[in-house]
Image: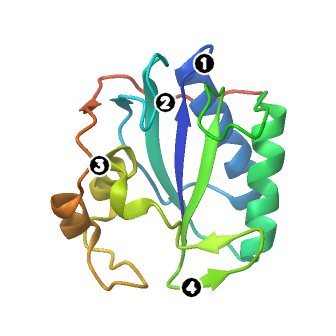
C-alpha cells in the first residue's frame, strides 16, 4: 500500500486534484481509497489562497523510487514549478506519505514523510481513509496523531466530488 497527500491552491483546484489522481491511477491502477475533498488553510505562510486537499492510497508493485519518479512527472505535467522557496502556491503538490511499513531515508526520499504528525491538512483526510494505520516509526495510529497534532489551521470537509477525465 502506498499513500499520498494531494493538494492544489492555483487554477482549477478540483480539476488539478482529479487530473493528478487520474495520472497516478494510469500507472498504479484504481485507488484503494480516496478521501473526501477538504478546503484547508495554507500551512506556514500567509496571503496564499486556500488549498483543496485529499488523501489517496493504492496497491502497487512499483519501487518507492519509481513511485517518487511518477510523482515528479505528474507534478511537472500539471504545471508544478519548483524554486528554492518551498512554500509557494502550486497547481499540484503530491507527497508520498507511506509505502507499506517501510522506513526509508535517502538523499531524495524520506518515507514516511517526516512532517505528517504536524500537518492537520494531511492528517484529517488521511484519518478518513486509514485512521487505524500505525505510523511505521512511532507506532501511533493516524487517529491518535491527529488528536496530538499541534497544527491549528482550518481543515473543512467540502461537498466537492472528484471526477476522472482525460488530461
Alpha carbon of mark 4 to alpha carbon of mark 2: how far?
31 Å
Which residue shows up at 44% across the image and 38% down it? 44
- For label 4, count other residues whose C-alpha is less than 10 Å away and answer few (under 14), some (14-19) or many (20+): some
Q: Which residue is mark 4?
A: 103
Q: Are marks 1 and 4 in contact (CB under 8 Å)?
A: no
Q: Are marks 2 and 1 in contact (CB under 8 Å)?
A: no
Q: Which residue is mark 3?
A: 124
Q: Are marks 4 and 2 in contact (CB under 8 Å)?
A: no
Q: Earlier in the sequence, mark 2 or mark 1?
A: 1
Q: Which mark is residue 116?
A: none
Quarter-wise, where is residue 81 in the image?
A: top right
Q: Which color scheme did the rendering employ for the protein?
A: rainbow
Tell me residue 21's x, y (percent): 62, 42
In this picture, is 60 found above or below 49?
A: below
Q: Which residue is mark 1?
A: 10
Alpha carbon of mark 3 to alpha carbon of mark 2: how far?
17 Å
Disc 4 element: loop
Which residue shows up at 66% across the image and 81% down it? 105
Of the two numbered discs 3 and 2 in the rendering, the one whose residue sits closer to the viewer: 3
Q: Can residue 27 be seen here?
A: yes
Q: Can residue 62 be seen here?
A: no
In this picture, is 44 found above or below 133?
A: above
Q: Which residue is mark 2?
A: 162
Q: Earlier in the sequence, mark 3 or mark 2?
A: 3
Q: Earlier in the sequence, mark 3 or mark 4?
A: 4
Q: Are marks 3 and 4 in contact (CB under 8 Å)?
A: no
Which residue shows up at 75% across the image and 32% down it? 80
Q: Is residue 64 left or right of residue 114?
A: right
Q: Earlier in the sequence, mark 4 or mark 2?
A: 4
Tell me residue 157's x, y (percent): 26, 32
Of the two numbered discs 2 and 1 in the rendering, the one whose residue sits closer to the viewer: 1
Amino acid at each position: 500500500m502506498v499513500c499520498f497527500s494531494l493538494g492544489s491552491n492555483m487554477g482549477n483546484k478540483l480539476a488539478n486534484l482529479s487530473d493528478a489522481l487520474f495520472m497516478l491511477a494510469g500507472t498504479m491502477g484504481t485507488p484503494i481509497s480516496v478521501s473526501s475533498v477538504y478546503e484547508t488553510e495554507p500551512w506556514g505562510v500567509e496571503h496564499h489562497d486556500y488549498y483543496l486537499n485529499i488523501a489517496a492510497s493504492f496497491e502497487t508493485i512499483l519501487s518507492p523510487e519509481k513511485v517518487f519518479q511518477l510523482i515528479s512527472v505528474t507534478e511537472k505535467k500539471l504545471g508544478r514549478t519548483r524554486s528554492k522557496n518551498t512554500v509557494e502556491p502550486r497547481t499540484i503538490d503530491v507527497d508520498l506519505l507511506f509505502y507499506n511499513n517501510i522506513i526509508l531515508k535517502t538523499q531524495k526520499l524520506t518515507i514516511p514523510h517526516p512532517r505528517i504528525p504536524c500537518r492537520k491538512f494531511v492528517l484529517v483526510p488521511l484519518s478518513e481513509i486509514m485512521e487505524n494505520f500505525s505510523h511505521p516509526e512511532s507506532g501511533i495510529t493516524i487517529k491518535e496523531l491527529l488528536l496530538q497534532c499541534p497544527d491549528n489551521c482550518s481543515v473543512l470537509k467540502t461537498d466537492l466530488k472528484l471526477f476522472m477525465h482525460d488530461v
